[in-house]
Image (spheres, rainbow, N blue to C red):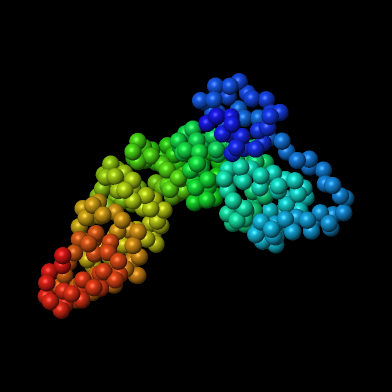
Amino acid sequence: MTILELSQHWPFFTSQTPIPKPFQNHNNLNLRTLPQFSRQPNTPTTSDRGLIFREKVIYLKRLNVNPDKAFRENPALRSSPLSTLKSVEQCLSSMGIHRSEMGRILDMLPVLLTCDPYSQFYPLLDFLLHEVKIPYPHVQKSILRCPRLLVSDVETQLRPALCFLRELGFDGPHSITWQTTLLLVSSVEDTLLPKVEFLIGLGFTRYEVGNMVVRSPGLLTFSVENNLRPKVEFFLKEMDGDVAELKRFPQYFSFSLEGKIKPRHRMLAQLGLSLPLEDMLKVSDGEFHARLLEFQLEGRPWL
């Protein structure tokens, strides 16, 4: 990315901003050496505390942020100058996040309203661009898909998760993309590892588990007790299934047990039919019922 392109994304770079030596060769962007952007002065323009407070409330409402929630969840907001909030907005806007989307993020994570964008956002950008290898235009998509990235520590959270996921198989053609960066905010010990161990406990090898999760990354976002275990038990006991079929169709876990799996299995069982999971679940409700009716009326086998 060239300095010209960078300045379009990060308007804190101006003609008066000296270009660090590492950037004089525009082919190797390193966010760790970026100069701090110009911050607005932290001195309030008025000593009227009531007026300052009202200005913050009006500003938050314009961002579609609930002021009551923001002040309750981030007490530092009361003493922070309005310029701090504007610096956060300016930084997020420079990352390609529109105001409407920004309001949703800041309302969800009020702690960001008083953060230092330089120390909070630059390390994340550096990590996503240079370690995860997310293309710059996709950084915005990553954040919108998973705003928690903005409050996740690179050293203690994101980098350990990335290493674990790469060892599992999220590498090369299966590398983490903007669609799967949400996996990076998961704790290795408390979230990712228990799911891997559960699947290994069913008789899969770690290599087989890796193949399953890169094909269906959602597996790593599901609760073991509320999702994986009940679906496995129903499949093995009620459907008389074979674990090997779960290897072939790991997307099984992404379907609702009560809303789709059980009802469709029940209808098929009543007609004495048994179908592979993919044929049973991937078709739409309309197509499933149409084919079922066609079989009942004509006695033809499932096509």
- Determine the residue located farthest toward the right in the rendered image: 47
> What residue do we see at 55% from left, 21% from top?
25
Q: How many marks?
A: 0
The residue nearer to you, when weighing 36 against 10, is: 10
What residue occupies the far bottom of the structure in this picture?
297
Residue in the picture at 58% in, 48% down: 97
Residue 220 position (above or below residue 25)? below
Q: Nearer the viewer, residue 189 or 10?
A: 10
Q: Is residue 210 left or right of residue 24?
A: left
Nearest the viewer among 298 and 200 is 298
Q: Residue at x 26, y 69 (%)?
A: 287
Q: Which picture quadrant has residue 14?
A: top right
Residue 39, x across and y down, in percent: 73, 38
At a point 34% along the width and 62% down the height, the residue shown is: 255
* 35 lies above or below 170: above
Quarter holding residue 60? bottom right
Residue 104 seen anywhere in this rendered image of the structure = yes
Residue 186 appearing in the image: no
On the rendered image, what quadrant is the C terminus found in? bottom left
Left or right placement of residue 199 versus residue 141 in this view: left
Q: Position of residue 149 (x, y in %)?
A: 53, 46
**12 lies above or below 223:** above
Image location (x, y in percent) of residue 136: 50, 38
